[in-house]
Image (cartoon, grey):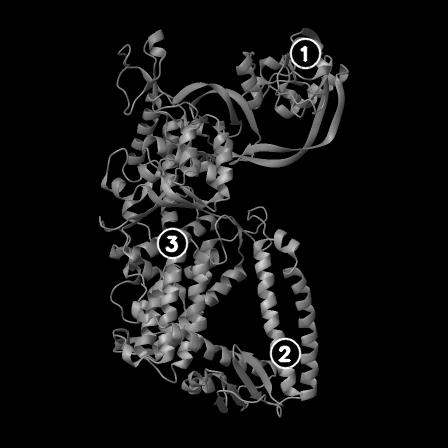
Amino acid sequence: MCQIGKILVDMEKIYKAKQFEGKIYQKWESSGGFIPKFDSKKKSFSIALPPPNATGQLHLGHATMLAIEDIMVRYHRMKGDPTLWVPGTDHAAIATQNRVEKLIGEEGQTRHTLGRVKFIKRVRKYVADSQGTIRNQMRKMGASVDWTRERYTMDDQLSTAVRYAFFRFYQDGLIYRGHRIVNWCTRCQSTLADDELEYREEKTKFYYLKYGPVVIGTARPETKFLDKIIIVHPKDRRYKKWHGKKMMVPWINGEIEATFISDEVADMQMGSGAMTITPAHSFVDFELAQKYGFEIHQIINESGEITEAGGSDFKGLLVKEAREKIIQELTRKGLVDHIDENYIHNLSVCYRCGTPVEPLVSEQWFINVNKKVRGKSLKQRSIEVVKNGEIKILPDLFNKTYFHWMENLRDWCISRQIWWGHQIPVWYCVTKKKRMCAKPIVALETPKHCPYCLGNKLQQDPDTLDTWFSSGLWTFSTLGWPQRTKDLANFHPTSVLETGYDILFFWVARMILLTTYLLDEIPFKTVYLHGLVRDKQGLKMSKSLGNGIDPLDMIDKYGTDAVRLSLVLGSSPGNDMRLYEEKIAGYRNFVNKIWNGARFVLLNLDKDDFRKKIDYKSLAKIDQWILHRTNEVVKQASKGIEEYRFSEVGLMIYDFFWSEYCDWYVEMSKITQNKAVLAYVLKTVLALLHPFIPFISEKIWELIGEKELLMVSNWPSVNPKNNFPFSKREIKQIIEVVSVIRQSRAEYHLSPAEKIKVTLYGHGLASTLNLNLAIIKQLARVDELVIKEKGEKLKGCLGQFVGNIEVYLHIADLIDISKECERLQKELENVSQYLDRLKKKVTNKQYLRNAPKLIIEQDKHNFDESLSRQKNLVAQLKNLM
């Protein structure tokens, strides 16, 4: 039990997160503190939470995102910036549909037996149930989002925004419907964008086949039934005589007429230098067919079966079956040159279900990324805003990746052949079969009749929009667009997009592409990319490996603050981090140290001490030192958070609190106590720690009797009164002297109870040492302390230097001198040899020219430290001999 003024509080030695976290979050939420307060004089700060899929549980990636974003949000809110953090969920079209199809499959049904209306109803119910779970999980993570502005990509407001965006793009000639080659998942029965593919390394067979006078290579003979074009390089002399010639060649289903053409796409160094093209099943070949006007024959259909184009013997076979049968037929005809049995290639698979993807020609809706409107294409706009610095990507090494992807971007296929999602706002007239009615009707609202024939029989396009189309509008659709709302004016562009680097192309690039066109402004000013969370061995976490960690289990076991710290400290943007339970348990201990440090201070303070003003006329040197250091930490913390150096800042604040405030200042203040300073520094540290560990900091804040929530209190500022550089230097020297005496005690196994005598030669600092004599004696456990300006070297003593200060420990009677001299001599030899090696490195011009800067700096630091150690060892030996 701890008495603070007239308030009796129970503050146990161990911090029990479960007792406090739920109640604290309720207080935050009910206080209205998550809702921003408009202030036109202040710069706003806003983040649109990357919406988790509305299909289930938050994972470690989400937990990392929430921890990092909450640090930024709490910091800016405490700074007094109007701060908005918009929460929400994504309808996750394919993922959600697959999940619900699996559930109804267990009931013996399919979406087709249910019908579209009933199936959508089931999906909506499933999503509603999942959203409640996600909200609770976000609250457990301490996310201080504005729940009054929660959004969902399928709610009415966002659905309006999606329709409006589609309409705008269509009206401006940037959305079109056409036959192009797409990535097709035969399991999901839908198209996939290029960045929705995953790649799996696979060992397969590579076939070298005789095709007339050339040998062609392929891993997919099942696509080659109607290959009629042989392409060779214009400069390949081997085939010069064949350019433009036609010939009949024996092939899978009999003879076929082949035509030679020359094009630089052929690689003279690869295989025979000749290739045939399959326009319906290769992106490169499709572009060639478009270029030359070749026929396009679809060999594989949407179900992954061979079409009529493959002939009656092969029609209806699945790809794998057809491949085996084709090779048997070609072998029988003597058309197989040879087979590489160990060919390794990257197989593209669906990112959702893992099914191999088929490139197919299909009629789909596309966004044209190359067409210029208002002087620029979508691609050009997206590249320009990053190149000119309007959008900053952290770390900047991802700029190169972003530019490469954008420069090679193909027209974006935005239609999907699934039921769940935003149905494409296009209708077709089926009243009369008139040519004028063939034109699609694109409208913001469901049309009542055909604008061409006035008929009322209309059918909506059954396809839905790519999920990334709606989520690409997220930063502004959540703020009320297409209406010009107050939120849109105050909080857009958003300040930061914080997300995993693995969706830089899935989502970030599309947001830039859509926003720069529709709003003619950027969606965010900074992109902060966090890395993936891996296991202790650096492996990706997965169900199959059984190495996953559920953040909610860890919260129940160790508390939210410990989980947050484990995801932030030691991490940096763009780099993967390793997480394991022992690490989280370690941060639980870290949090408990803060609790105990505060508990010790509270045991020595009264409630009124937290209201007292500091009397600057009566400050001791130690008070001036800790106030000066507090100023420095406040300044460094603010700067570090502004620069997104969250790990560095969190570790620095903790180190200051534990190593300087608790270990040194609190101990020193037992001799000369200034309660107002003790209270001031504790309050400041709690405020600095709050964005990182909000629950425990808020609880301690409550215990010291503060009426206002810490969450909405002022962020600490640098106090010009707390500028004491001379005291900082003096106390730093006292700490170093005490540390050397403590280290010597430990090194020689002298118990704290062992009484020793110490002599100090100040060399200009004797008065400072005398002023702090009581502190040195108590903290270093010195029985007799002699301080002089200078003197002779003391024989039979352990002597060391702390800067210019000579420290002599009179311990000759307490240790074996000969053994100690032997030990010191051996260490001196080792240090001297190490110094020789380092000296050769740091004076080698070639090494200094070629080695990484960080390595050179570390070597120089090691050299300086070893040189200092060598000097102390020599002095110790002289004094002992």
User: Where does the C terminus fall, quadrant-wise?
Assistant: bottom right
Query: How many residues crowd mark 3 within 10 Å: few (<14), some (14–19), many (20+)?
Result: few
Is disc 2 placed on a helix, strand or loop? helix
Q: Tell me if I can see residue 468 in this picture.
A: no
Residue at the image point whose x is 50% and y is 63% from the top: 585
Label of residue 133 in the image = none
- Disc assigned to residue 253: 1
Question: How far across and how far down the image is residue 96, in percent?
Answer: 43, 37
Q: Which residue is mark 3?
A: 642
- Image vertical order of residue 91 relative to residue 881, above or below: above
* Residue wearing tag 2: 873
Image position, residue 180 (x, y; %):
49, 20
Give the alpha-carbon distance from disc 2 to disc 1, as whole Å.
89 Å
- Give how far apart the Cα atoms at labels 2 and 3 are: 44 Å
| Dot 2 or dot 3, earlier in sequence | 3
Residue appearing at x 31%, y 72% in the figure = 680
Crowding at mark 2 (Cα within 10 Å: few <14, some 14-19, many 20+):
many
> Mark 3: which amino acid?
Glu
